[in-house]
Image: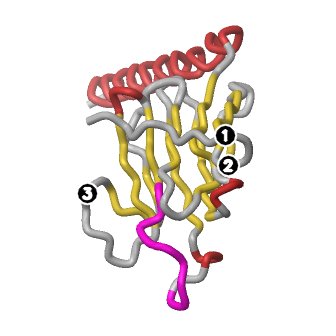
Amino acid sequence: TEPPPPTTAAGRGPQLRVIKLDPQKPKAVYKVNAAPGLATVIQLPEAWTTTPTCGDCVFGDGKAEAQLWRLDVFPDTRTLSIKPTRVPGADAPASAFVTNIDVTLDGGLAVTLFVELTLPEAADARVEFTIPDADRGDAKLTKRERELEARFEERVKQRSDERMLSAF
């Protein structure tokens, strides 16, 4: 399935925002502004290592119980779409409509999206995260370092086990 198209508005209204990720900050939090009746599309610069998690979301076409947000995940296009499951009211004031989405990218960057309800004219229709080309190597280096570290730990453990067994 395809993500919903971005909402556009002339003049004031939901907007496109582009945010550059900094590989020197492997863990960072970014605010996303969402509005009732509007799906906010979030484009990530690379695939994620595991399915993104969301504290107060129903995923896809699941039935919302008490969740205040719906999150659709599109791995093929590296996009997420989030929108409120209902409008604020007496039982759920606007201040209750906050949640976090946690995503770990293949390159090793961990991104937390702090999603907050706002007025439609202040909402993000689309948020595109980028990694500048000059920094892509640094982000990938993090992944390579993790892989090398894991292989090294495995070799050390294997050698340690061999020594223990040869002692008997």
Residue 85 painted magenta: yes
18 shown above or below 123: above
Tell me if mark 1 has few (under 14), some (14-19) or many (20+) residues whose alpha carbon lies within 10 angstroms of its own: few
Numbered disc 3: secondary structure: loop
Front tag of 3 and 1: 1
**Mark 1: amino acid:** Ala
Residue at mark 1: 10
Disc nearest the viewer among 1 and 2:
1
In the rendered image, which quarter contains the C terminus? top left
Look at 40% across and 59% down and name the residue there.
70
Asked if the residue at tag 2 contacts the one at tag 1, i.e. Cβ–Cβ closer than 8 Å, the answer is: yes
Q: Does the magenta stretch mainly form a helix, a strand or a loop?
A: loop
Where, quadrant-wise, is the N terminus in this rendering?
top left
Which callout, 3 or 1, points at the residue further toward the start of the chain? Answer: 1
153 or 108: nearer the viewer:
108
- Quarter of the image for residue 133 reads top right
**101, above or below 138, in the image:** below
Q: Give the residues drawn in magenta, as a range.
A: 83-91
SS for dot 2: loop
Q: Are marks 3 and 1 in contact (CB under 8 Å)?
A: no
Kind of residue sitting beneath label 2: Gly
Q: Residues within 10 Å of mark 3 (few under 14, many from 20)?
A: few
Local SS, label 1 = loop
Residue 35: image location, x then y, percent:
58, 60
Where does label 3 land, which residue? Answer: 61
Q: Residue at x 63, y 58 (%)?
A: 120
Q: Which residue is mark 2?
A: 13
